[in-house]
Image (tube, rainbow, N blue to C red):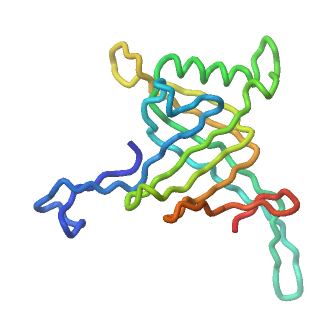
Amino acid sequence: MPGFVIEGNEQKNSLAGAKSEWLRTHRFVITEFFNLDVSKNPEFLAVRDISLPDKEIRSFDILAPGTTYKFAKSVTYGDLRINFYGSNKLLTDINKLHDEAHNLEEGIGDFDKYMGQVKFRIFSSSDRSQYVQYKYYNAWVSNVIHGQVTYGASEIKDIGVNIKFSFFEVTRQLKNGEEEDVVIKDKKGVWKPT
């Protein structure tokens, strides 16, 4: 389970006289993973961690009398990284998605076979009705790693997936049930923060 857990009393800062009050920093829930309906798929067991893509902004300088102006030249995002527990069947399905993009026998594959959407929500500790939702478009699996959860033979795998994408959008669920865009699209089709 992502986030950390604190057990405390009424002050919520002391562990002395601890009661059964649990505070979680956040919780990830994957709602869409390519063409798989995660809520009805028993192959997904639990999300361990999600690392959001890092952002790199390259700039160039214009020298003016007495000052230097910096302008953005390009923005690139890294990979989305998802770690979760799943079955051998799920690992096989994800490896097929990875191999559809490129393999030695067929070369580069048809994008309709391996591209999809990835959508997940991050819930806060204070109010489960509020969340931030990330939706990644034209996503594809660029790398898959896996390991055993136990030392013995196990059906459960620890699966790590790197995902490349074209663009993403972020929305926030408000208390009144409405959604608020955190990232909007302007008239030129460029995604920018609000």
Q: Quadrant of the C terminus?
A: bottom right
Task: Compare residues 60 and 51 and report the one nearer the observer.
Answer: 51
Task: Compare residues 52 and 110 and report the one nearer the observer.
Answer: 110
53 shown above or below 16:
above
Compared across the picture, whether 60 is left or right of 153 comes to right
Q: Quadrant of residue 118?
A: top right
Residue drawn at the location 30% of the way across and 52% of the way down: 5
11 shown above or below 38:
below
The picture places residue 52, in percent across and down from the top left corner, at 58, 49
Residue drawn at the location 60% of the way across and 24% of the way down: 94
68 shown above or below 79:
below
Residue drawn at the location 46% of the way across and 38% of the way down: 47
Q: Quadrant of residue 178?
A: bottom right
Compared across the picture, whether 79 is left or right of 122 comes to right
Q: How many marks overall?
A: 0
Task: Compare residues 98 and 135 and report the one nearer the observer.
Answer: 135
Residue drawn at the location 38% of the way across and 57% of the way down: 125
The picture places residue 57, in percent across and down from the top left corner, at 74, 60
The picture places residue 189, in percent across and down from the top left corner, at 84, 56
41 shown above or below 23:
above
Compared across the picture, whether 85 is left or right of 64 comes to left
